[in-house]
Amino acid sequence: MWLFKKDPNIDFMSHRRLALIASIVLLSVAVGALLIRGLNFGIDFTGGTVVEVGYQEAAELSSVRQALNEGGFEDAVVQHFGSAREVMIRLGPRDDVEAAELSNEVVATLREHDSSVDLRRVEFVGPQIGEELTQDGILAMLYALGGILIYVAFRFEYRFAAGSVAALLHDITLIMGVLALFQITFDLTVLAALLAVVGYSLNDTIVVFDRIRENFLKMRKGSTEEVMNASINQTLSRTIVTSFTTLLVVVSLYVLGGELIAAFALTLILGVLVGTYSSIFVASASALALGVSKYDLQPPEKEGADQDEELQRP
């Protein structure tokens, strides 16, 4: 790889126990956040109404929230989208009020404080549709993970496959824990980002495992740890370049894309960082802990090979 004139010689596997402790601590925090705070589901899953309004000048979100609170909309979620003059208001489902009437009440409440408020868009998701989307989203995640399990089971030796699955579960749990901890809205765009992270993390792991498998067959000398370290170092340049270029794109989306795709971009950023870490310290370390060695992939010697070799000697 062009990034390094020669392959680095970093002893990754010697730090696997420290990485294990770090992962256990982070996973404990993530699981605790999921159990205590839970995911902050958006209206895609819970149902509700989204009202988008525009102002002639930059709108202060605190003032908008205060106006809605005074109007009886205490549960409203207010955020900018597109620019500081455009505001998105999310409201939970209300059985006693229709979506059109609810949006009119919201706009009327805001116009009492600023007559320049202009209604841009209203979107309504019923509770039944939200429930169906929740079920479909869970099924999509389960189908994706199930397909990956089948793929890695046929592609790799079972201890490598177990390491790949451990890395995927590690990544998804950490990301969902961060979303729960900071109460970031979990909607369909975030679910799509999670599915993309699954593919990214698996691809990164497969690249490392392919090189480990090749080196198990090529490197006759050296322990399993040394072969794994050599393989990770050989793919390190590719990993850094791929992660860096991907981060450039998703960070740009997060900074310049506005509130509408902020959660989507943040999920991808976390996925790239965590996926790069897990392909080295979780997937490889898990396979090593399960006892994988180069002897598991060595082709069996043919019976009578020694006799054939003696017969071929002059």
Image: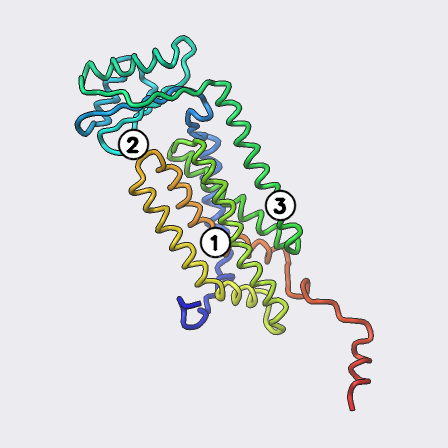
Q: Nearer the viewer, residue 174 or 111?
A: 111
Above or below — where is 76 with respect to 35?
A: above
Above or below — where is 214 with respect to 173?
A: below
Q: Amino acid at mark 2?
A: Phe
Residue at which label 3 appears: 149
Q: Amino acid at mark 3?
A: Leu
Most distant residue in the top direction: 96
Label ID, residue 19? 1
Which residue is painted at 55% across and 37% down in the image? 141
Q: Amino acid at mark 1?
A: Ala
| Cα distance between the residues tagged 2 and 3 | 38 Å
Residue at which label 2 appears: 81
Above or below — where is 126 with respect to 230?
A: above
Q: Position of residue 240 (x, y in %)?
A: 42, 59
Label ID, residue 4? none
Q: Earlier in the sequence, mark 2 or mark 3?
A: 2
